[in-house]
Image (cartoon, grey):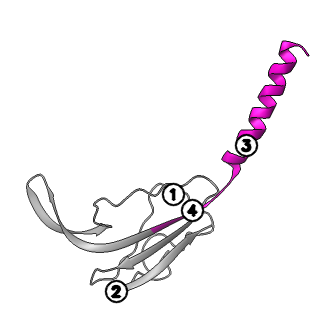
């Protein structure tokens, strides 16, 4: 076998070894606890809605083809909705935006609901 044939064979072998790693979709689970918390910015403190104690909330990391399961527990005395910035939603637009318009229903106080993205 010549050097070019060995290089081609090695390249094909590496591609086959790495392909399943990149092609596998997975289910990613997140728990969001929504609470009111005092946050100080520029020497000014105010009570804001936080996700897991963070403002802005934590990032959601996913790859194309992944399935997201997000459990949202609302500890705020008001109904809330979540708007997913930067996430292209196919067949799950009902889970994004204002309550009763593009979102089926808001997350009610002291209740947990799950949002599933296909």
Q: Residue at x 47, y 54 (%)?
A: 86
Q: Residue at x 34, y 86 (%)?
A: 110
Queried whether the magenta region covers residue 6, the answer comes back as yes
The one nearer the camera, 27 or 102, is 27
Q: Quadrant of residue 89?
A: bottom right
Q: Quadrant of residue 91?
A: bottom right
Q: Secondary structure at mark 2?
A: loop
Determine whether label 4 and label 2 are within 8 Å by CB.
Answer: no
Asked if 27 appears above or below 21 in the picture, the reply is below
Near mark 1 (Cα within 10 A), the count class, few <14, some 14-19 or many ≥20, is few
| Quarter of the rendering occupied by the C terminus | bottom right
The residue carrying mark 2 is: 110
Instruction: Characterize the magenta stretch by its predominant secondary structure.
Output: helix
Q: Secondary structure at mark 1?
A: loop
* Range drawn in magenta: 1-30
The one nearer the camera, 17 or 39, is 17
Sequence-first tag of 1 and 2: 1
The residue carrying mark 3 is: 19
Asked if 65 appears above or below 48 in the picture, the reply is above
The residue carrying mark 1 is: 87
Q: How far is mark 4 from mark 2, CA to CA?
A: 27 Å
The residue carrying mark 4 is: 89
Determine whether label 4 and label 1 are within 8 Å by CB.
Answer: yes
């Amino acid at each position: 076998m010549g050097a070019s044939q060995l290089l081609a064979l090695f390249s094909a072998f590496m591609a086959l070894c790495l392909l399943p790693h990149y092609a596998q979709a997975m289910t990613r689970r997140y728990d969001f606890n929504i609470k009111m918390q005092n946050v100080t910015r520029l020497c000014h403190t105010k009570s804001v809605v936080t996700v897991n104690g963070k403002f802005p909330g934590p990032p959601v990391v996913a790859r194309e083809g992944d399935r997201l399961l997000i459990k949202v527990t609302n500890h705020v005395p008001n109904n809330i909705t979540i708007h997913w910035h930067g996430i292209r939603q196919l067949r799950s637009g009902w889970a994004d935006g204002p309550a009763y318009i593009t979102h089926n229903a808001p997350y009610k106080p002291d209740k947990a609901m799950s949002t599933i993205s296909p």
